[in-house]
Structures are given as C-alpha cells and as structure tokens.
Image: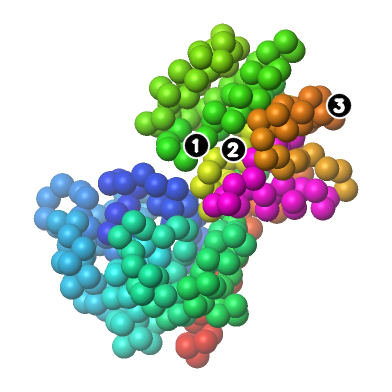
Amino acid sequence: MRVAFVSMHTHHTRDTPAIRRRTRLIRLLSHTDHEVVVLCSRWWDGDHPTFEQDGISYRAVDGEFSTNRFVAKLPLAIRRVDPDVVHMPNTPARHARAAKAVCRLLRVPLVVDWWAIGDDDSDSDCRSVASNADRLIAPSQTVETVVREYGAAESAVSVIPEGLDFSLIESAPVNDEFDLVYSRQLDSHANAETFLLALAELRDRDWSAAIIGNGDAASDIERTARDLRIRDRVSFLGELGDEQRVAVLKGAHVFAQTAEQEPFATNLLWGLACGCVGIAEYQTDSAAHELIEEKSRLAETRGELVSTPQEFADEIVAASALEHRTIDPAYERYDYSNIVERYLTCYRQAIDNYGLL
C-alpha cells in the first residue's frame, strides 16, 4: 500500500502536537512493508523536488509555504505519486478541501486525521471536510463528538488514540527523586498553576515535585511556584529525552493533569503506563477524563477527576494509600505496534469502499 501524507508543514518547519502525532505515524509506517510518501512544502536546501531522510521520501509541492500555491499545485502532486490512500490533517481546512477534489477525480480515498480546528478555518470549511472525507480519524471521543457536530457520519469516524513505546517503559531505569510529576509543553494552555496551588495546600507535608517541559509560559509558572513559597520543592527539568522522562515517571507516584486543551492526554497516558496514580482536573476542552474514566473501569482505581485545587490536594493525600508501581501492563494495548495496525485497518476500510481491493 502506498500512503501519501499531505501537509504543507512537517516537523522540520513547525512543532505542534498534531505534527508530532503524524510524524510518529510516518516513521512507524516507514518500518513496515508499506510505502510512505510525504507531500509538503520544500524545507530542504536546493531546488531539487525530492529529498530522502531516514528512509522517508519527501516531495515538494511548492517551495514558498504559500497556502494559495500549495493548494494550486496539490492536484498534480497527488497525481504524480499515484497513492492508494491520501492521509492529511483537518487543518488548514482549505488544503483538505483541495485534496478531496483531486482524490475524487483519481478515485483515491481521502483519510483526514482530525486533531483540532485551526485559527483560520471557517465553519463552512470544517463542515465540508467533515462531511466529504472518506474516513476521519479522531484521537478521542471528545474530538469525535466535535467532528460529528460538523457533519461527519458516525460510521465514517474511527477513534485512534495516541500511543506509546511500551518496551521503553519496560526497560527504562527508575528515577525515584520525585513524588509528583507534571509533564507537558508549557504553553498558554498548560494551566500548571492548579497543580502548584494544590501543592501549596500541602506545604506542611513531605513531598517533592517535578515539572517536565519547556514553553513560553515556563517563566510564569516558575514565578507562581516562587510566589506560593514552594519553589525550593519543585524542580523544573525542562525537556527530557524519552528514557529520562520515563525514568522520572516510573519513580513518581502521582501524575498531575491540568491542561485546558488536550485532544488526547498523551503525557497522562505515559504516566499511567508508568504506574502513576493519575489526577486530572476536568476541563471542557480536554479529553483527559477519558483516560481517568477508563482507568476507573478497571479492577483497581488509580485515577481521579477533580475540579478545584483543594480537591486536587485531597486526592494527592488519598493516593499515598496506594502502592507504588513502576509499570502498568494494562496499557500495553496502547503500544505503537497496535496503534499503527489500527491506522492500517482504517486505510483498508477506506480503500475497500472504493472497490480497489
């Protein structure tokens, strides 16, 4: 199967959760028997139209990162690749609309991976993408609801969550320096202040905490820790390599999830898989509650939803009664190998609908 990934930006030119999700999938597929081609704006030096890196073929649609030029040249670029299926993000919605027109002409199914709506996407464009894509993929039931509200048929939407490298969790060492951990990009939606307020309620108790991640809001979050007089007990670790991050998670007892926007709570998933007790603040635009509710349906509850810093503090205290773990085998089902198979199943379903198999 030849899969064409269409996106003006790649991880070489922009870093977003949706791009990171797509990059992981591209790399996973590149290690299978299937062929992967990435159609994008030219990010490499020179004017040659193709570039190979780490076994992945990149083909330039344009070289200017111009939406108008990208949309205008996309039909010919897709035709030249001759894919079995086209995979692209829901945003910019104009790109997905343009791709659908040529896919219909070439009788190639269009699979849209919907993460979040872009700032420049109009309601009409979103409705067009949701109702006209051959298959849609959502990372969570929360996002699935949004997609269906824009007109997607229930039968056209597959929920495929984020994944993790379970073998890394099994093999990584344990760093038991910290009791509580928050891990996420520290942007305007991080909302780590709720976690810090909860810790301030417990300043008379014995604990140590770590915040993993960088971002524009990092300095403000650190200032809040100083203002609450707990800065000496909260370590800001910045970005960590995968093994270092997993080691911290395996050593911690509680993972704090407070972000205001999370189409899928990827870091919470890693924390739970590393044996942490998950405590999540409910947020309207976050799917974190799905992982906590899923955990609650298992034999032993090791996750709780809260609404206030005081409730968060109370659950931290309650978590101390639970045994410490460094791994939870229940989350092996989220291993990347299983996730890539779910994508391939979705592609095959889209192709079957066109009668090409």
Q: Which residue is mark 3?
A: 321
Give how far across and how far down residue 310 sits, in percent. 70, 29
- The region drawn magenta spans 271-298
Mark 1 neighbour class, 10 Å CA radius: few under 14, some 14 to 19, many 20 or more: many
Tell me whether the residue at label 1 lies in contact with that at label 3, contact meaning CB atoms closer than 8 angstroms.
Answer: no
Which residue is label 2 attached to? 258
Percent x, y for residue 17? Answer: 45, 48
Measured Cα–Cα span from mark 1 to mark 3 = 28 Å
In the rendered image, which quarter is residue 344 located in?
bottom right
The answer to whether residue 165 is magenta is no
The amino acid type of the residue labelled 2 equals: Thr
Q: CA distance from mark 3 to mark 2?
A: 22 Å
Q: CA distance from mark 1 to mark 2?
A: 7 Å
Badge nearest the viewer, 3 or 2: 2
- Please state which of the two labelled residues, at mark 1 or mark 3, is closer to the viewer: 1
Q: Amino acid at mark 1?
A: Ala
Q: Which residue is mark 1?
A: 190
The relative height of residue 352 versus residue 294 in the rendered view (above or below) is below
Residue ranking furthest to the bottom: 355
Pointer 3 or 2: first along the chain: 2
What crowding class fits label 2: few (fewer than 14 Cα within 10 Å), some (14-19), or many (20 or more)?
many
Left or right of 9, for residue 88: right
Q: Residue at x 82, y 53 (%)?
A: 297
Q: Residue at x 43, y 24 (%)?
A: 220
Instruction: Tell me whether the residue at label 1 lies in contact with that at label 2, contact meaning CB atoms closer than 8 angstroms.
Output: yes
Residue 245's x, y, as percent?
A: 56, 29
Element type where label 1 sits in the image: loop
Disc with the residue nearer the chain's start (1 vs 3) = 1
